[in-house]
Image (cartoon, rainbow, N blue to C red):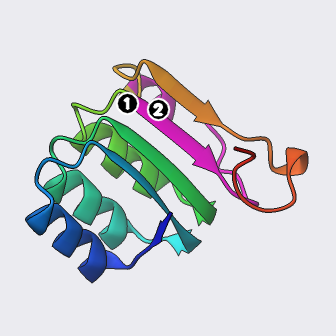
Amino acid sequence: MCVANEEVLLTIGQFCKKITKLKVGGWWMTKEEASAIANSMKNLKTLILDYDLVSKDSLLIISNGCRGLKSLELCGREGVAIDDEIQRSASHLKVFRWENPSSFVYGCLR
C-alpha cells in the first residue's frame, strides 16, 4: 500500500503511465489527492482506498474522472454514506465495494 499525498500521486501518474492497480491510504483523502488520481492515472482499472475518511466529493471526483476504472474498494474507519448520486457516478464499475466500519479494527480485511 502507498501512503501518499497529492504530489506523490501526481508523480506516480506521471512516471507510471501503465499503472492499472493502486492501493493507497492514509488519514483522510483530500479532493486534491482524488483529482491527482483521476487526472493522472487514466489506465487505472483497480483502486483500493484505505483511508480513515473519504469524502463524498473525493469519491465523485474519482468515479467521474476514472472512467476506465473497473473496481473501486473503500475501507476505513469513517465511512461516507453511499447515496444515489455516488451509486449513479459509480454505475460503470464492475466492482464497487465498501467495508462496514464496525467489521474491522483498522484497514481492509484482506
Residue 85 badge: 2
Query: In the image, residue 49 lies at what x, y percent?
Result: 52, 54
Q: Nearer the viewer, residue 89 or 107?
A: 107
Q: Quadrant of the C terminus?
A: top right
Secondary structure under tag 1 reads: helix
- Asked if residue 24 lies left or right of residue 31, the reply is right
- Residue 79, position in %: x, y? 70, 52
Q: Which of the 4 image quarters holds residue 45?
A: top left
Q: Magenta stretch containing residue 92, yes or no?
A: no
Q: Nearer the viewer, residue 102 or 57?
A: 102
Q: What residue sits right under mark 1 in the picture?
A: 89
Amino acid type at image mark 2: Glu
Q: Residue at x 24, y 52 (%)?
A: 38
- Helix, strand or loop at mark 2: helix
Asked if marks 2 and 1 touch (Cβ < 8 Å), the reply is yes
Give the residue displayed 41% in from the left and 76% down from the top.
4
93 displayed left or right of 35: right
Q: Specify whether residue 65 is in view.
A: yes
Specify whether residue 83 is painted magenta. yes
Q: Amino acid at mark 1?
A: Ser
Q: Which residues are magenta?
A: 71-88
Label 1: how many Cα within 10 Å (few below 14, some 14–19, many 20+): some
Tag of residue 23: none
Circle 2 residues within 10 Å: few <14, some 14–19, many ≥20: few
Looking at the image, is 86 positioned above or below residue 95?
Answer: below
Residue name at image x 15 percent, y 45 percent = 42
